[in-house]
Every structure is written in C-alpha cells, then in structure tokens.
C-alpha cells in the first residue's frame, strides 16, 4: 500500500515543542478525528494507548510507529507527526522520538495491518528520507517528503 493511500496532507503535522508521549498520542487522535468525523478522538486515543501498554512502538533511531485497531474503519488511516524536539518514548534503543507515523487499521485486517506497518517501517528506514523529514519546516514539505 502506498503512503499516499494512508496519509493526507491534513493528517501531516510539524508539531510544536514541549510534547510528551501522551500528548503526541492525543494530537495524533485529534488529527485523525478531524478528518474522520465518525471516529471519536477518545476511541482513537484509547486504541493507541492499548497498544502502547503492550510495549512501546518506538522502533529506534528517533522513530515510532504507534498503531491501533478499530472496528469502525474499513481501510488504514495514517497520521504523521514531526516533533520540534525529541520526546521520551521508551523506544527499543532508549533514544527519544521525533518522527511518528501512526496507523489506525481495521480490527479484522491482521495481514493487511502487518504489511502496512512493514511498508511504513521500510520507508522510514531510509536515512535520506528521515533526514529530509527532520529538515521540513512546514506540514506541506513534510507530506511531500514522505509521499515521494
């Protein structure tokens, strides 16, 4: 699945400094709820928190892939956040996180969920893409970098 099928410019944001792990997950939920009005932000937030309780989705190198399953959706929804300042996220390498690509996936689509996560992780494993994302100063540029 292409990144542009998951993500929209409206769900891509360069975030202000001073975020915590909880606050960035709330921000992700707010952005997704704004674009999908039939999904309550508290439900989105709870799905992310439930997954984080199982273990951090921080995959290392300043990157996290928070994700949650929802019964109300039929296709994956992505949200991209670039933090101005890295935040503690309990990542596997113990480093703070500044790039977060969140996914909300249909509850029953287990194989699609894994394939989508793998595709996003592959894209974010490219150092030149991450470097360009970290240099982005606005939402549009951030979206353009990830969607290339």
Image (spheres, rainbow, N blue to C red):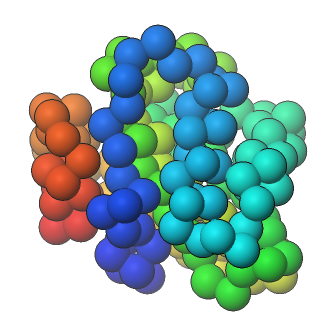
Q: Is residue 59 left or right of residue 11?
A: right
Residue 70: quarter of image: bottom right
Residue at 48 percent across and 56 percent down: it is 79
Residue 31's place in the image compared with 58, above or below, is: below
Report the front residue among 84 and 42: 42
If the image is split into quadrants, where does the N terminus sit?
A: bottom left
Q: Is residue 9 left or right of residue 111?
A: left
Report the front residue among 107 and 126: 107
| Res. 106 visible in picture | no
Residue 56: quarter of image: top right
| Res. 123 visible in picture | yes
* Residue 66: percent from left, percent from top: 62, 46
Residue 112's place in the image compared with 120, above or below, is: below
Q: How many marks?
A: 0
* Residue 113: percent from left, percent from top: 66, 72
Report the front residue among 91 and 16: 16
Residue at 75 percent across and 46 percent down: it is 45
* Residue 143: percent from left, percent from top: 24, 57
Residue 25: quarter of image: top right
Q: Is residue 35 left or right of residue 122?
A: right
Residue 91's place in the image compared with 46, above or below, is: above
If the image is split into quadrants, where does the C terminus sit?
A: bottom left
* Residue 5: percent from left, percent from top: 40, 80
Identify the residue at the far bottom of this view: 74
Residue at 85 percent across and 35 percent down: it is 53
């Amino acid at each position: 699945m292409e990144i542009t099928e998951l993500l929209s410019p409206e769900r891509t944001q360069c975030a202000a400094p001073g975020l915590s792990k909880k606050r960035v997950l709330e921000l992700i939920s707010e952005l997704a709820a704004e674009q999908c009005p039939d999904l309550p932000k508290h439900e989105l937030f709870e799905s992310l928190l439930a997954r984080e309780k199982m273990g951090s989705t921080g995959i290392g190198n300043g990157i996290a892939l928070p994700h949650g399953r929802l019964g109300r959706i039929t296709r994956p929804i992505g949200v991209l956040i670039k933090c101005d300042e890295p935040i503690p996220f309990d990542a596997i390498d113990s480093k703070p996180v500044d790039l977060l690509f969140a996914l909300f996936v249909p509850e029953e689509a287990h194989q699609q969920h894994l394939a989508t996560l793998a595709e996003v992780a592959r894209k974010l494993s490219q150092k030149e893409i991450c470097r360009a994302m970290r240099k982005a100063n606005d939402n549009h540029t951030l979206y353009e970098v990830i969607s290339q």
